[in-house]
Image (cartoon, rainbow, N blue to C red):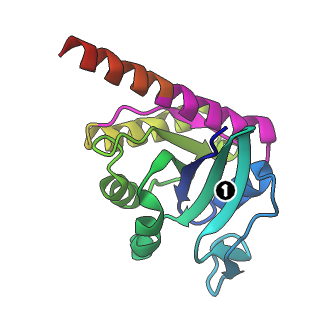
Amino acid sequence: MSNIYKKLAVVGEVGSGKTQLIKTISEISPFATEAKSSVDIGKEYTTVGIDYGRLSLSEDIALGLYGLPGQKRFQLLWDMVRNGLWGLLVLTKFNNELNVKSLDNILEHFDPINNQIPLVIGLTHIDTAENDQEIDLFIDIISYALEQHGINAPIVPVDPRDIESSLMILQLLDALEQSSAINMEATQNVV
């Protein structure tokens, strides 16, 4: 029996739910690198390094959960996690304006297409929207940003406090990985 270790990067802006998602699904006490915020960001603490948790997917497969700040100044941390990723989850907090530049930086750095990393965009805090049209417009903006990178990825609502919602993201990433593996195998058989 071999032990397999996979890595999931959970990246997002301040308050998007990275630390909470890892706390929700980790089977170990997560290692969190939160510090008291010196500016008003809508919450008392913010991630200043890598949050880490772990989840057993089966008897011989473990998933490392790496929560990473979404700001470009943390690229050194992104580099530490980027190689060998099983999946990339970008958490995007619903609000009045999407930080498209931050999303662009994340997509450029992790380069999910060329690195063959399954990508899901998790939309958090949608309960703060006044109506479905606001959410649809926000999703359209995210879709446009993805298209600029040639990326077609699912954009799904997620509540990082809810275990079922959070685990659904892992199931979606697993399905994307399996679909990618099947497509690669089919392409190799044609050649």
Instruction: Please give the range of residues in magenta.
Output: 151-177
What residue lies at 26% left-to-right and 37% top-to-bottom? 150
Q: Residue furthest front?
A: 1
- Quarter of the view holding residue 39: bottom right
Q: Residue at x 81, y 52 (%)?
A: 27
Membership of 92 in magenta stretch: no
On screen, residue 80 above or below 109 = below
Residue 33 vertical placement versus 5 (above, below): below
Residue 22 position, x and y percent, is 71, 55
Q: Amino acid at mark 1?
A: Gly
Please tell me in which quadrant of the rendered image residue 74 appears: bottom left
Q: Position of residue 152 (x, y in %)?
A: 36, 31
**Which residue is at a point 70% across and 59% down the rendered structure image?**
53
At label 1, counting other C-alpha atoms closer than 10 Å, the crowd grade (few under 14, some 14-19, many 20 or more) is many
Which part of the image, by quadrant, shows the N terminus? top right
Q: Identify which residue, 177 or 58, lies in the foreground.
A: 58
Quadrant holding the C terminus: top left
Residue that extends furthest to the left in the rendered view of this protein: 191
